[in-house]
Image: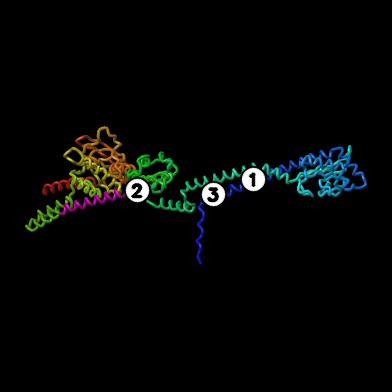
């Protein structure tokens, strides 16, 4: 037995169209029926009114009154043949023929017919109740008699000059005639109803097309599924998503975008008025096309953004702007660079360790034990490793020593001497290594780049670090200077902290290179410092030929250690620093 496949359900737009057509048809039919009934009732009332007028006219005729009175005074009713040839029959038929009435009936005071369109009915009692008219009342009626349905009136006939009722006149118009009048009047109504139906059908088709266009041809179930999927995807991804409609309003601003930009939900806001970086807005301006990725700093983060045009078939749906966080990636890259630099330094020092061990072994083999002890003392004073950073021992924090030492090795490879300034004094321990590394690393990297690009043959970068003790968390002050050529004349000091201001091309210049990763170090460093309540600013702009620019950073709450303990050990620590520096100098002379 072959199984028939179930019929596919009608599309939502088709169901809506059929429902609209049904509603329009029902409204038109109800309106036409009501109008037809009102027309029918009006024409029937007009027929009743005309019948009443005609009945009054006949009943008030003196000859009719006299003839009815004469018959009523006779002892019985005349035979039908005599009534058919009598004056009442002649007068009634003349009136009926002249007015087009269905009937004009005249009766005596008992309701027996004295005049009737059908002569065979003469002398018989009327088929409808004549009591109201015979009691002196005028009435209008709609009933069915021997001649069919009619709309008429009954009027009493009085004796001449008296108020005595001697009979009644009944006049009626055929309801078929009323129906014909309604048919003549209903023609315009039918045309109006047909026009309304056609207009409703056309409007329904236009509404169906608009609905189909607005829903992109999707069914309600599909739209509901898309909404659920959109919410799940947009709120589940770590990338920021901003949707901008074709009319320039933000339609999507997911939680990741709010977090990355540090803003509340901006859905419904005009894109040009939204408090987002101008670089994001430039991605959606006319002529930008599908722009490649650009970098910007927002909320203390380095973001990569790109904008793409959203199209459905040929319909322009607006723009989609994607945001990705590169802050953690840059931090990991910086840490890997530091580890790689340390590894290079360790490999470079391996041969020095081997030479030092051979020297000690030589002293021991020839019995020079005292010289071996002195040599070991000098090694202990200078440390197991020797970075190319002068006075690194002023940084007591091991993290700062390692980080600055690694930067010193990197600078040395590029022909730049990294040195510690004489005002440096750090006795506390760094508590927020991530922010300190980001700010200090960016300042040192920019200074090294400026020194390499400078015209001075003596390339150097000088770093001074001072911690200000506080029971609630010390403040770290950092000053970085270089031997570069400084800022170009007329450069706004605040411009160097703008996104895209870079030294990568050999001189400080504005350079928005998409995805290049350049020009965001100072902007990021300032945002991180300000987020902690600190600051990064330009102290000196420098001059051509050197010295170059001088930057200062203030990082509150980045060191730990009580104020009293540091002051207590100050003198001993200074003596140790001087002793260590002299021993290091002696070691350098010995191994020169």
Secondary structure beneath label 3: helix
Q: Which residues are magenta?
A: 322-350
> How does the figure colour the protein chain or chains?
rainbow
Identify the residue position indicated by label 1 in the image.
Answer: 32
Q: Is residue 289 above or below residue 346?
A: above
Q: Residue at x 64, y 41 (%)?
A: 188
Identify the residue position indicated by label 2 in the image.
Answer: 324
- Asked whether 304 or 410 is in front, the reply is 304
Image spot of residue 117 (x, y percent): 81, 46
| Residue 334 lies within the magenta run | yes
Q: Is residue 56 left or right of residue 566?
A: right
**Count of marks placed on residues:** 3
Which of the 4 image quadrants contains residue 74? top right
Crowd band around label 3 with a 10 angstrom C-alpha radius: few (<14), some (14–19), many (20+) = many
Q: Is residue 27 left or right of residue 412?
A: right
Identify the residue position indicated by label 3 in the image.
Answer: 17
For marks 3 and 1, the one nearer the N-term is 3
């Amino acid at each position: 037995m072959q199984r028939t496949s179930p019929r596919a359900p009608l599309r939502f737009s088709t169901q809506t169209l059929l429902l609209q057509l049904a509603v329009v048809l029902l409204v038109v039919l109800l309106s036409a029926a009501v109008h037809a009934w009102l027309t029918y009732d009006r024409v029937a009332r007009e027929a009743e009114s005309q019948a009443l007028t005609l009945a009054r006219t006949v009943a008030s005729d003196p000859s009719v009154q006299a003839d009815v009175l004469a018959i009523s005074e006779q002892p019985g009713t005349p035979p039908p043949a005599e009534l058919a040839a009598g004056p009442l029959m002649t007068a009634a038929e003349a009136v009926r023929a002249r007015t087009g009435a269905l009937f004009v009936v005249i009766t005596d005071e008992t309701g027996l017919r004295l005049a009737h369109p059908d002569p065979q009915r003469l002398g018989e009692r009327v088929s409808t109740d004549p009591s109201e008219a015979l009691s002196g009342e005028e009435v209008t009626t709609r009933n069915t008699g021997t001649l069919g349905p009619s709309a008429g009136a009954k009027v009493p006939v009085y004796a001449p000059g008296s108020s005595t009722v001697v009979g009644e006149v009944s006049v009626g118009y055929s309801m078929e005639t009323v129906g014909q009048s309604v048919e003549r009047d209903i023609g315009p109504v039918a045309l109006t109803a047909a026009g309304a139906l056609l207009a409703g059908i056309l409007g329904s088709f236009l509404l169906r097309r608009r609905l189909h266009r607005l829903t992109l041809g999707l069914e309600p179930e599909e739209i509901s599924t898309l909404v659920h999927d959109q919410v799940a995807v947009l709120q589940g991804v770590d990338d920021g998503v901003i949707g901008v409609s074709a009319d320039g309003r933000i339609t999507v601003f997911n939680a990741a975008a709010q977090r990355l930009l540090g803003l509340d939900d901006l859905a419904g806001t005009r894109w040009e008025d939204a408090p987002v970086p101008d670089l994001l807005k430039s991605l959606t301006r006319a002529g930008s096309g599908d722009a490649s990725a650009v970098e910007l700093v927002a909320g203390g983060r380095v973001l990569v953004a790109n904008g793409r045009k959203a199209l459905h078939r040929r319909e322009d749906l607006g723009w989609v702007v994607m945001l990705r966080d590169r802050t953690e990636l840059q931090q990991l890259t910086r840490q890997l660079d530091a580890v790689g630099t340390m590894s290079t330094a360790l490999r470079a020092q391996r041969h020095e360790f081997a030479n030092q061990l051979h020297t000690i072994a030589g002293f021991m083999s020839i019995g020079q034990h005292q010289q071996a002890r002195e040599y070991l003392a000098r090694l202990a004073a200078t440390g197991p490793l020797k970075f190319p950073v002068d006075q690194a021992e002023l940084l007591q924090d091991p993290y700062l020593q390692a980080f600055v030492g690694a930067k010193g090795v990197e600078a040395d490879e590029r022909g730049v001497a990294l040195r510690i300034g004489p005002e440096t004094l750090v006795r506390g321990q760094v508590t927020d290594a991530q922010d300190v590394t980001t700010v200090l690393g960016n300042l040192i990297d920019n200074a090294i780049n400026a020194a390499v690009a400078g015209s001075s043959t003596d390339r150097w970068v000088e770093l001074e670090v001072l911690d200000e003790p506080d029971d609630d968390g010390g403040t770290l002050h950092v000053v970085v200077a270089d031997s570069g050529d400084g800022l170009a004349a007329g450069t706004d000091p605040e411009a160097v902290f703008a996104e895209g201001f870079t030294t990568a091309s050999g001189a400080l210049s504005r350079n928005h290179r998409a995805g290049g990763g350049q020009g965001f170090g100072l902007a990021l460093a300032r945002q991180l410092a300000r987020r902690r309540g600190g600051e990064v600013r330009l102290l000196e702009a420098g001059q051509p030929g050197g010295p170059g620019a001088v930057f200062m950073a203030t990082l509150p709450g980045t060191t730990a250690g009580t104020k009293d303990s540091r002051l207590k050990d100050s003198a001993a620590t200074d003596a140790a620093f001087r002793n260590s520096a002299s021993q290091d100098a002696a070691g350098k002379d010995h191994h020169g």
